[in-house]
Amino acid sequence: MATGLPSQTQVIELLDGEFARAGYEIEDVVIDARSQPPRITVIADGDTALDLDTVADLSRSASDLLDADIPGSYVIEVSSPGVDRPLTSEKHFRRARGRKVDVTLTDGTKLTGRVGATGDGAVDVVVRDGKGWSTRQVPLDDIAKAVVQVEFSPPSQREMELATGDAEKGGRT
């Protein structure tokens, strides 16, 4: 790494409190010392999506905090994880509620559905069955891979009711 650049740990320690106050968690920090000027990318996620105003505010705060502690020549970039990030934890599934996902189970079975309630180590996945839509509870330990899919048409009303909890549901969130 180029001289004068902070480490990933330093960036997280310096910025974590500021991001938390804004309602976001730092998911990752990528430091590219080979680009000119060097680039520090902070990947943040929260219960609400990062909008452009929030990205700008967090970028300014990050720049101010890093410049005060670790002056140098580098570009700070704040970004969201992106749609292609695999869902790997309960919080990822909670944040993806209502989104369409492709899921591969540990037994090799694949299913496509919409993320519903998540809790107690499981996620409800709204799937199409012979009668319409139903909810299938899948233990998180049974999921080998899950990725949010880009959609070009709106889901059915019933599918979204089941996923977002607007229909009758148990005590899960």
Image (cartoon, grey):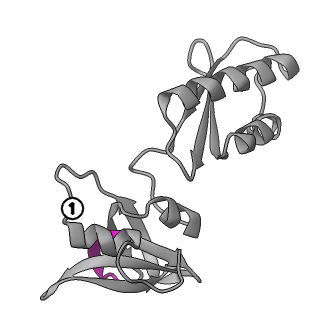
What residue is rendered at 73% in x and 45% in y? 20
Whether 89 is drawn above or below 23: the answer is below
Residue toward you, 101 or 9? 101
Magenta residues, start to end: 108-114
Residue toward you, 142 or 119? 119
What residue is rendered at 38% in x and 60% in y? 147
Q: Position of residue 34 (x, y in %)?
A: 59, 21
Q: Quadrant of residue 156?
A: bottom left
Q: Residue furthest right?
A: 69
What residue is rendered at 23% in x and 73% in y? 158
Report the magenta stretch's main SS. strand
- Binning the other alpha carbons within 10 Å of mark 1 as few (below 14), some (14 to 19) or many (20 upward) gives few
Q: Position of residue 109 (x, y in %)?
A: 30, 82
Label 1 amino acid? Answer: Pro
- Return the residue at label 1: 155
Q: Position of residue 58 (x, y in %)?
A: 65, 29
Whether 22 is drawn above or below 34: the answer is below
Whether 142 is drawn above or below 10: the answer is below
Whether 53 is drawn above or below 47: the answer is above
Residue toward you, 127 or 112? 127
At mark 1, the secondary structure is loop
Q: Quadrant of residue 136?
A: bottom left
Total labels: the figure holds 1
* Residue 26 in view in this figure: yes
Q: Is residue 107 magenta-colored?
A: no
Q: Is residue 110 magenta-colored?
A: yes
Q: Is residue 141 left or right of residue 8?
A: left
Q: Quadrant of the N terminus?
A: top right
Q: Is residue 63 left or right of residue 106?
A: right
Q: Quadrant of residue 57?
A: top right
Residue toward you, 29 or 155? 155
Q: Position of residue 35 (x, y in %)?
A: 56, 18
